[in-house]
Image (cartoon, rainbow, N blue to C red):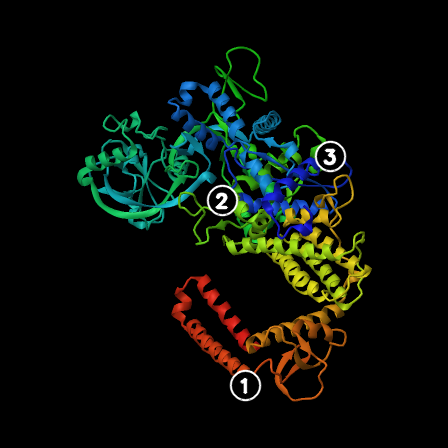
Amino acid sequence: MALQDRTRFEPAEVEPRIIERWLASGLFHPDPEDPTPGWSVAIPPPNVTGALHMGHALNGSVQDALVRRHRMQGERTKWILGTDHAGIATQTQVEKLLASEGTSREALGREAFIARTWAWRERYGGTIIGQLERLGASCDYASERFTLDDGYVRAVLEVFTRLYDKGLIYRDNYMVNWDPGSHSAISDLEVEEREVDDHLYAIAYPLAGGSGEVVVATVRPETMLADTAIAVHPDDERHAHLVGRTAVLPLVGRELPIIADAYVKPDFGTGCLKITPGHDPNDFEIGRRHELPEISVIGEDGRMTEAAGPSYAGLGVLDARERVVADLGDAVRSVEAYRHTVPFSHRSGERIEPLISLQWFMAMHELARPALDAVRDGRLRIHPASERRRYERWLQEIRPWCISRQLWWGHQIPVFYRGDEVHVGTRAPDGEGWTQDPDVLDTWFSSALWPFATLGWPQDTAELRAFYPTAVLSTARDILFLWVARMVMMGLEFTGDVPFRDVYVHSVIQAPDGRRMSKSLGTGIDPLEEIERHGADAVRFGLLAMSSTQDVKYSPEKVAQGQALANKLFNASRFVLGKVPEGTRPAPRPAAVEDRWILSRLQAIKADTAARFAAFDFSKLAFGLYDFVYRELCDWYLELIKHREVDEDLGATLLHVLRETLALAHPVIPFVTEELWEHAGGGEGEHGLLAGARMPAVDDALRDPAAEAAIEAVIGAVTTVRGWRNDAQVKPGAFLRARLNAAGYEQTAGLVARLARLDLSANGGDPAATVAVPGGTVEVLASGDFDPAEAQQRLEQQRADLRREIARAEGKLGNQGFVAKAPPDVVAAEREKLARLRADLEAL
């Protein structure tokens, strides 16, 4: 359908057609052998179980804006695409499916379960890839990777073997975060702290020899069955006499040495701390320092073990707690309500059970030092600076990483056993009788290789040479340690270079009421539904406009602005292309001051857009484009030239400005701009797509400060006079007799007269009203089109109303109680309102 036959932009009709053209063009799949400089970005691989949520949509919009910008700058651009096998999440989904069928993974066996999981992945795993297409993400769909594909598995096995040979991967009985929900150990970074209401029990332990007692405080009386010492602070004079003595463990009778350790907090409870190395990470460290026995009375199934004694073995933790407290009787000296933070699994939501377990670990200090140096010497830049400080603190305090998981779906650890023999390698050893370690690697271990394993490492591939290191990583702050820091460590260790030059940590989009987005809370907003309702361009623009370095509330108004921008640009293009003679070649050929103004403003927005991209300032980038298209191009320039005949010069300038505007806006709103580009003459080459066109550069020769000043004065004068006309209730169509007594309008008085509906041919007569404009005044002469007295009365009433509102707002903000107690956003809104009211009064 011809553009002139359409009255509005219809995303539902346009977007599928444009996506098909993009994919067919091959633009998104660059040739690694091409000598053009490469530029790449690796998508944070979404879980294979996932569907597009608002975080994906924001990050996808950020990355795609960057990718399209660099592609249009002539760089050989690759957006590395793929999905993560998501060990725990995927295994949980398949186990739920099996349970609904009346079976289980144990009943199937490992081999059959893995085959079933692959089948599930083939059926459901591609959902999010199609959804990224809907967003307009220009990924390399032809080279989609998966963290369990054959090439990726080879890379993971190679990394594990090299780190093991280097002594950085080892097996040890160590305290881990045991997740009863997934029946697996998880890393510290997969643990989230929550506030919980518990009870604090004060329990008396008699001293050996019957001469007194020691009272300890605990929220977990059931773990006392595994106590192996009591500790006090070495500087706590109250208990100095106890150090070196022994106490008797109630219910068990085991003698416990009383030791001194600086970890103990003298102001907690009585200042005496029961030490349970088998069930508390801090006690574990104390136990290692003092060579204490490590007893485990809670098993991996969450039940009390035989070591707890016959009275408690087999009980669940809470049942055991109840029985222990009952059996202690009077030894429980007090019970009080106690609120504290408790670790929970981010994966399953279950409360973490600290256990000593035989697991595989990775020593991190040797890898962390180069990752710190990379930030400090500027090879890696993290934006904003606050996230860089978080990154540095974590690396400075890094602990060994538990990399083994008690799962079946994932990269099985490449360690093989036969009797006392152990073999570690990328292939199983020859011979019979070898069994492979049953555990799999933490999903984040394989994800840490993403930027180089996706490009063919450990082989020296053309893709690796062309596109590693990548340029930018855009990510959320909650995986800065889980993923980003580990990618930096692995990249430096195995390629000798950082995996990316810049890390942009984007904001988290919250629900409009400020709560986190969640289906269970009823606060989730589906980006696909928003795309259906408003179009992908609108959602992309809205999310970029919302983005900042802080968490932000989802704003339907900004999405609506994006939809309005797409429609405005569509209608402006219809207007321009309807005026420009067929066969016109685009070129800047200014014939009037307004032409010089728009060409100069076009150079300014080009420069501003480039600076915003470089600074990752996507909100100001979006609003800068919006202001240029909506206000300067559509509301003013097209109005300023409406009276002119579109000759060759004006036609060339109009087409030039339109095409450069489409190109400039394309990275943010790609669908509407691509659709209009074809109607505006298209591009060079086989496909002629805007996505493959060159981004227009700033042309300093077209900068024109004088033209900008002249037209800004026109805009100021017209805006002020229109406001006065509205306030004075002048008939809309009336041309008022007036005099323009102002400097700087020698070339533009006619524009002011036409747009403000003024007849400036009048000479005599006294002014009935005077309106201040840039450079002077407009004197409005008496006429039958308005009543000066009535107009003045209305203006005075408006001034009085504004003064009352200002006084009310000043009183509110002068109230320290309001400023101190009201939410910060409420106070900020009141200050913005006051500034607006004062500006309105000043204008009147």
Kindly identify the amino acid type of the residue bearing the numbered disc 1.
Ala
Position in image of residue 25 (x %, y %): 71, 37
Give the labeled residue for mark 3.
31
Residue 526, numbered circle: 2
Position in image of residue 524 (x %, y %): 45, 46
Residue 789, numbered circle: 1
Q: CA distance from mark 2 to mark 1?
A: 56 Å
Position in image of residue 325 (x %, y %): 22, 37
Position in image of residue 613 (x %, y %): 65, 52
Secondary structure, mark 3, is loop
Q: Is residue 411 above or below residue 30?
A: above
Among the 4 quarters of the image, the one containing residue 314 = top left
Give the residue at x 60% y 80%. Answer: 785
Quarter of the figure that contains the C terminus? bottom right
Q: Nearer the viewer, residue 252 or 533?
A: 533
Among the 4 quarters of the image, the one containing residue 586 = bottom right
Give the residue at x 58% y 81%. Answer: 786
Mark 1 neighbour density, 10 Å: few (under 14) some (14–19) many (20 or more): few
Give the residue at x 56% y 29%. Answer: 167
Q: Nearer the viewer, residue 692 or 34?
A: 692
Mark 2 neighbour density, 10 Å: few (under 14) some (14–19) many (20 or more): some
> First in sequence: mark 2 or mark 1?
2
Residue farthest along the left direction in this orientation: 330
Kindly identify the amino acid type of the residue bearing the numbered disc 2.
Asp
Q: Which of the two discs, 3 and 1, sits closer to the camera?
A: 1
Q: Which of the two discs, 3 and 2, sits closer to the camera?
A: 2
Q: Nearer the viewer, residue 395 or 73?
A: 73
